[in-house]
Amino acid sequence: MKMICAIIKPFKLDDVRSALAEVGIEGMTVSEVKGFGRQKGHTELYRGAEYTVDFLPKIKLEIATQTEQVERVLEAICDTAYTGKIGDGKIFVYDLQQTVRIRTGERDIEAI
């Protein structure tokens, strides 16, 4: 089993969610986060004063899936979240040691 963590632009969330549903992903955790990478921040003007926004809003998706499904999930996220501009995001894939569904006690693949 694998845990996929994807950081994407907020306006791409609905498209990515739909693409993941098409490849069989039935659930995920979505968080609103802030961060920066090569994109750094940007300068904004508010009531005549200029200020720097260092942390940009992003969406973090966490998806637990079977190892066999990882490539399809990565392809769906990459194809859908791509804009070609800096700040499109990153995807991290971790090994998932164990999963337990609290309500039923199911474990591992059955719990996903």
Image (spheres, grey):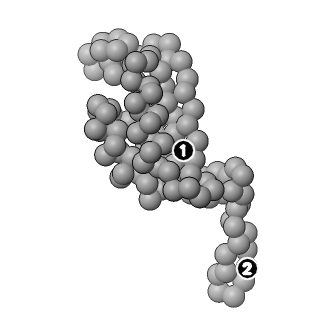
Q: Residues within 10 Å of mark 2 (few under 14, many from 20)?
A: few
Q: Residue 43: percent from the left, percent from the top?
A: 71, 72
Camera-side residue: 24 or 33? 24
Under circle 1, the secondary element is strand
Which residue is identified by label 1?
7
Q: Residue 54: percent from the left, percent from the top?
A: 71, 60
Which residue is identified by label 2?
50
User: Looking at the image, is 13 positioned above or below residue 71?
Assistant: below
N-term mark: 2 or 1: 1
Q: Is residue 111 left or right of residue 8?
A: left
Say which amino acid is labelled 1.
Answer: Ile
Under circle 2, the secondary element is strand
Asked if disc 2 and disc 1 are in contact, CB closer than 8 Å, the reply is no
User: Looking at the image, is 21 positioned above or below residue 102?
Assistant: below
Residue at coordinates 40% horizontally, 39% vertically from top-left?
Answer: 76
Q: In this view, does 23 lie to the left or right of 13?
A: left
Camera-side residue: 83 or 92? 83
Residue at coordinates 68% horizontally, 52% vertically from top-left?
Answer: 36
Q: Can residue 39 be seen in this view?
A: yes
The quarter holding residue 108 reads top left
Image quarter hosting the N terminus? top left
Give the number of marks. 2
Residue at coordinates 55% horizontally, 37% vertically from top-left?
Answer: 91
Q: Residues within 10 Å of mark 1 (few under 14, many from 20)?
A: many
Residue at coordinates 39% horizontally, 23% vertically from top-left?
Answer: 69
Q: Is residue 29 visible?
A: no
Q: Residue 62: percent from the left, percent from the top?
A: 46, 35
